[in-house]
Amino acid sequence: MRDPVLVPRLRPFASTVFAEMTALATRTGSVNLGQGFPDTDGPAGMLDAARQAIADGVNQYPPGPGRPELREAVAAHRQRYGTSFDPESEVLVTAGATEAITAALLGLTDADDEVILLAPYYD
């Protein structure tokens, strides 16, 4: 079986700093603090809510901007810090930062556009 080969435009991005640091930590028996892995499983109430959602069949792909009740909860949380966001038009829930950045770039730039990245930047 031959090794998988990335298309040329993706070859410079074959490995992330996170993958390299995880491999190094594993190889040397070190603690990997680079990715911000949580050191607990999370609050009991959150775990109970997750179990209940699974039991209730809330297990399908969400709408593109995220589940309405989650967007409303995010907006309500921000209210506690003095910021106001409309959950219908100003809150978007993604699977992670990488997905959010990708969605923003895909939605706001064209193939021939110039994008300037300032370092240090998100990896």
Image (cartoon, rainbow, N blue to C red):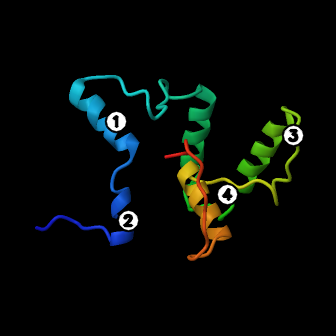
The residue carrying mark 3 is 83
**What residue lies at 62% left-to-right and 38% top-to-bottom?**
49
Helix, strand or loop status at disc 1:
helix
In front: label 4 or label 3: 3
Q: Can you say whether 12 is above or below 54 in the image? A: below
In front: label 3 or label 2: 2
* 13 horizontally vs 62: left or right: left
Dot 3, crowdedness within 10 Å: few (<14), some or many (≥20)?
few
Whole-percent x, y for residue 30 in the image: 30, 22
Outermost residue, left side:
1
**What residue lies at 60% left-to-right and 68% top-to-bottom?**
114
Helix, strand or loop status at disc 2:
helix
Helix, strand or loop status at disc 4:
loop
N-terminal-most mark, 3 or 2: 2
Dot 4, crowdedness within 10 Å: few (<14), some or many (≥20)?
some
The residue carrying mark 2 is 10
N-terminal-most mark, 2 or 1: 2
N-terminal-most mark, 4 or 1: 1
Dot 2, crowdedness within 10 Å: few (<14), some or many (≥20)?
few
- CB of mark 4 within 8 Å of CB of mark 3? no
User: What type is the residue that disc 1 sits on?
Assistant: Met
In what quadrant of the picture does the N terminus appear? bottom left
N-terminal-most mark, 4 or 3: 4
User: What type is the residue that disc 4 sits on?
Assistant: Gly
The residue carrying mark 1 is 21
Q: Image quarter for residue 90?
A: bottom right
User: What type is the residue that disc 2 sits on?
Assistant: Leu
User: What type is the residue that disc 3 sits on?
Assistant: Thr
Q: Distance between the residues labelled 2 and 4?
A: 29 Å
Helix, strand or loop status at disc 3:
loop
Q: How far apart are marks 2 and 1 (CA)?
A: 20 Å
Mark identifier at residue 66: 4
